[in-house]
Amino acid sequence: MKKRPGLVLYSDEKTPKVLIWHGENFYLEKLPSGSKIIYPPEPLKGLKDLRSQIKYALENPLGDSKPLKDYLFAEMKLTIAFDDISLPLPPMRQPDIRQLVIEEILNLAAEKGVDDVVLIAALALHRRMTQLELRHILGDRIFEAFYPYGLLLQHNAEDQKELLHIGFTEKNEDVEINKRAAESDLLIYVNINLVAMDGGHKSVATGLSSYRSLKHHHNVEAMLNSRSFMDMHHSELHSSNWRMGKVIKNSGIKVFQIETTLNNATFPHEFAFLQKREWEWDFKDRLSYYGVKKALDNSPRALTREVFHKIKSPYQVTSIQAGEVEEVHHKTLENVFAQQKVEVEGQSDILLMGLPYICPYNVNSIMNPILVACLGLGYFFNMYLNKPLVRKGGVAIISHPTTYEFNQTHHPSYIDFFEQVLTCSTDPLYIQQNFEESFAYDPWYSHLYQNGYAYHGVHPFYMWYWCAHALDHLSSVIIIGGNKKAVKRMGFKSATTLSDALEIAEDYVGKDASLTYLHVPPLLIADVK
Amino acid sequence: MKAIIYNNNALKYIASKATSYSRIAIDLSPITLSEIQEPEIPSQSWVRLYPIVSGICGSDLATIFSKSSLFLKDYVSFPFVLGHEIVAVNDVGKRYVVQSILSCEPRGLDLCNFCKSGQIDKCLNLNRGVIKAGLQIGFCASTGGGWAQQLIAHNCQLIEIPDELSDLGAVMVEPTACALHGVLNNVEPNMTIGVIGAGTIGLSTVACLSSYFKDAQIYVGAKWPHQQKLASQLGASWVGTPSNLEGQIRLLTKSMKVKSFLTSGVDLTIDAIATPESFNQALKITRPGGKIVLLGMPSVAKLDLTPLWLRQITLVPAYGYSQESIGQKRLKTFELAIEVVLKKRLESLVSKTYTLENYRQAIIHAAEAGKTGAVKIAFLPNLKKLKTEKNQKS
């Protein structure tokens, strides 16, 4: 049966309550009549016989690339880089597509007698992964064959010995990437493209780079000139990465890109109602909702967080493409949009978003207030093509508990950013100019990034910059049910309920304001006409 | 006369020790508002004073609620009238602030070596002489104290109040002198300084630091929002909650961490609270070879001094006031403190005044000053008398 596309529903009095995510919980809420509710398309059908599909992609590359086996030879130095734990969200059930692709690459390499193979997790400035997390992505076989021998590495953007400065772009941007990757005869990058922002030249130019290189596109100016960063043709973030990609290519580094796309089957059958439109819930779905809701309401947050972070998504792979970076990525985006794109007519005064428990930077961790802002105002706000879902001067209403809570191991610099920087200013540009470097070069954060499981010292700044476009665009941000102190610290307003939030929003957008509710996850990207 | 006196009552001492700050605890404590005899003047060098404003200090609260060390028992005499932050007038209405320390001179003794050099804060004779034991007025049975309608003081203890300083401003002179004494004897130019606590002493410390050490970087851990605002206004370079102080100093000093201890830290920390918790924090944020100034009044505490030893940090207690060297001159700390109070307008730290009759509310308010957005709470012991005199004059 053909899967149904996304839907824009104009609510009326008969429209049932809609589900709104609220961190490690959710609730049903009646939206005002006339509200626009955007539902994601239903999950596309996944590919069958994945191993054959992978083989086919490797043998039939796109662009000017030769089949992978033709690049392999016995004496070569081969590096396989792969996306880290920030993708996909939630993590996918085993076997992870990266495992299947890398196993196939290793089979080919073995056939050709390639001995010098190193795997590198492309962390950029993300935290290192634990052994269990690596095992989940790569499977036991690869892990056991590489990790004990020091051949499964995690990119270290702080170790100058492991980095190589390749050159400069025509805009004088430093291009510095992992030395082993740069000095290999072939660099294969294995990606999962969950959203349109991922992949392409960004994989290597960001994933294997350093602060020296990243600061040229992970900054406020780039964010303000990315409308949105999910649309590579209108994204300075991507333009910079593409310039860097060209420098990498021209330096002689051979990159063989493998990109994969997933459908949006985000939740396992126990949570099937989370995939459905509310008016189509059957008795079982309603029963599940009330059962789960009751359990969540009566459980401590630590427990509900643990339960949610155990969820492994039953994603199915919708495409695999390999070969030359730009051709591959072009095809990838077609597949991402096929699953996620929803056409929406016009902007509204208010954008309502319910944020779930997870974002790319808190897998197995706490979604601290900065990550709440980043997920809402960075990621969800930017899930558009053409123009934002909310008009200039409009209001964003976000539902999330926004607890004043941080993971000390994963986010140490976030704590200081929240306490020392946001107390001085919430203006991304001022923050960038006055505080960024002191965090970026802080030896303690560097130590924790390299030896612990901490995000880089500068990472919270990037999360705040991710909000820059939204902060510039909106007249106010209101958080429903958030910790008041944390919400205030970020310069946002607190509301207890949706009706409170709408009342507060009136001050900015007047009475009878139009409202759009972004009904995610599962993810969608709105093509706003 | 009316006075708030502290009686030597073991049962009440134990009862108040067992309770937390509350009205009941005050009733259980050894203090009472009583009618007592005016103190007798021991010699012609002494004068009778009429307190117009008298502050409530942290050490008073510790005494009332039995939180101070029994070590001090031999440096007080019972029953004593509380109050050592005193602004008073004499019989002809001249205004004074009182240096409450009862050193050799008021005691009618030959000056000890410290008093000879003006260091009355280190006097060797705090429990001898023509008056009974007592480290200060406010802890001595012979002199009375500021929380009464009268007290006596030796001429050498009186510092005239300049006309431009209000009565309420003047009550800030004594705590500011204490802070200034600790600052001037320990701080050097261009130091990085942590200040733990932003009650009266902490804020006075910030005022003194910013007055005398313009290049100092002053980092203040203040619990309550109004304290943070005031610390910032008084010249702190950075102000945050106590729990954020470590993070800020770590960033500033580019320090690493070993558990919760910074490997580096500030040059000097002023502990204006002096609890085990604040002292532990001082150890965490002070660099090896640095200095901790214990400015708040401590009590019995269980402390791990290993970090102090390993990091070779100098611990310097700072008590009271005496004279300070400013260039070639030796000036009384009180005289310098008056300048700071005027310059930094510390009168604004006096949040609320009470009559002696409302002593319960006053003491509770002082004990909960942070929570209630207040800083300094004071008594107006002769409010009725002053009003009457004013009416008569007019």
Image (spheres, coloured by chain):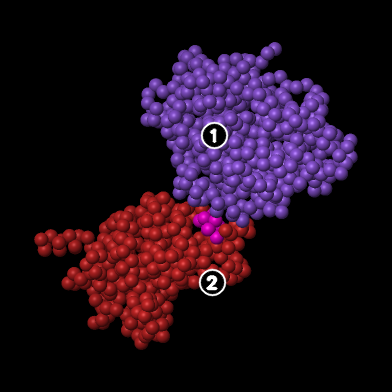
Provide the secondary structure element on which disc 2 rests: strand
Q: Name which residue type carries label 2.
A: Thr
Return the x and y of residue A136 as percentages of the image width and height.
Answer: 75, 37
**Is residue B107 something that shows in the picture?**
no
User: How dense is the environment of label 1, judged by Cα within 10 Å: few (below 14), some, or many (20 and up)?
Assistant: many
Picture quadrant where residue A273 is located: top right
**Residue B154 in magenta stretch:** no
Residue A421 horizontal side relative to residue A117, left or right: left
Provide the secondary structure element on which disc 1 rests: loop
Picture quadrant where residue A293 is located: top right
Q: Which residues are magenta?
A: B245-253
Q: Nearer the viewer, residue B48 or A493?
A: A493
* B41 over A132 or under it: above or below: below
Picture quadrant where residue B358 is located: bottom left
Q: Residue A226 got which mark?
A: 1
Chain B image colour? red
* B356 over A382 or under it: above or below: below
- Could you give the CA–CA distance between mark 2 and mark 1, rounded to whole angstroms? 55 Å
Q: Name which residue type carries label 1.
A: Ser
Q: Please identify the dominant SS of the magenta region.
A: helix
Would you name the residue on which mark 2 appears? B314
Q: What chain is tagged by disc 2?
A: B
- Residue at image position (55%, 53%) is A438
**Residue B248 in magenta stretch:** yes
* A356 over A489 or under it: above or below: above
- Residue at image position (28%, 62%) is B169
Q: Nearer the viewer, residue A183 or A29?
A: A183
Return the x and y of residue B304 as percentages of the image width and height.
Answer: 59, 65
Chain depicted in purple? A
**Camera-nearest label, 2 or 1:** 1
- Residue at image position (50%, 49%) is A433
Residue B393 horizontal side relative to residue A343, left or right: left
